[in-house]
Image (cartoon, helix red, strand yellow):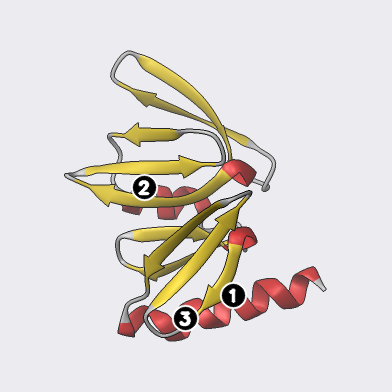
Amino acid sequence: MNPEEAGAEEYYDELYTIYTSDILYITTEKRKTIIFTKTEKYTSNKNISYWRNVLHTLSCFAYPHHSYIINLQYVTKLNKNDVTLEFNSDRYVLPVSQRGYSNFKKAYFSYIGAQL
């Protein structure tokens, strides 16, 4: 799957097409995952492990915390406690776990280096 590919997500009787480049982040909430995109918020009945498996081949996605998958394209700030994502005028501050910080930082620097 490349960053511009679409994935279909079905939630009960509704089917959505979501482009990976539009995903800001994915999180868990009450045994479901919530996919935050540039324009919408989608609920999925699949767990976060499913989404990690689907997105693991894309270098623009990383995991700062066991409950989050973040699109590195939108990261504007990172420290040991949280990561900030921005799109247009929206800002999202999400937690970074102590265990996840090192790997997330490596993934972020690797992604930034590949973009230069």
**Can residue 60 be seen in this snapshot?**
no
Above or below residue 21? Residue 56 is: below
Circle 1: residue type:
Tyr
Q: Disc 1 on helix, strand or loop?
A: helix
Q: Which image quadrant: the N terminus?
A: top right
**Can residue 112 be seen in this snapshot?**
yes
Circle 3: residue type:
Asn
Nearer the observer, 1 or 31:
31
Q: CA distance from mark 2 to mark 3?
A: 20 Å
User: Residue 88: x and y, percent?
Assistant: 63, 49
Residue found at the very far left of the displayed protein: 30
- Quadrant assignment, res 59: bottom right
User: Residue 61: x and y, percent?
Assistant: 54, 60
Q: Disc 2 on helix, strand or loop?
A: helix
Q: In the rendered structure, which disc, 2 or 3, sits on the residue that comes first in sequence?
A: 2
Q: Disc 3 on helix, strand or loop?
A: helix
Circle 2: residue type:
Tyr
List the residue tagged with mark 3: 103
Q: Nearer the viewer, mark 1 or mark 2?
A: 1
Q: Residue at x 66, y 38 (%)?
A: 5
Residue found at the very far front of the displayed protein: 89
Crowd band around label 2 with a 10 angstrom C-alpha radius: few (<14), some (14–19), many (20+): few
Crowd band around label 3 with a 10 angstrom C-alpha radius: few (<14), some (14–19), many (20+): few
Nearer the observer, 83 or 1:
83
List the residue tagged with mark 1: 108
Q: CA distance from mark 1 to mark 2?
A: 22 Å
Relative side of 27 to 17, left or right: left
List the residue tagged with mark 2: 50
Label 3 close to label 1 by CB (< 8 Å): no
Q: Residue at x 48, y 23 (%)?
A: 16
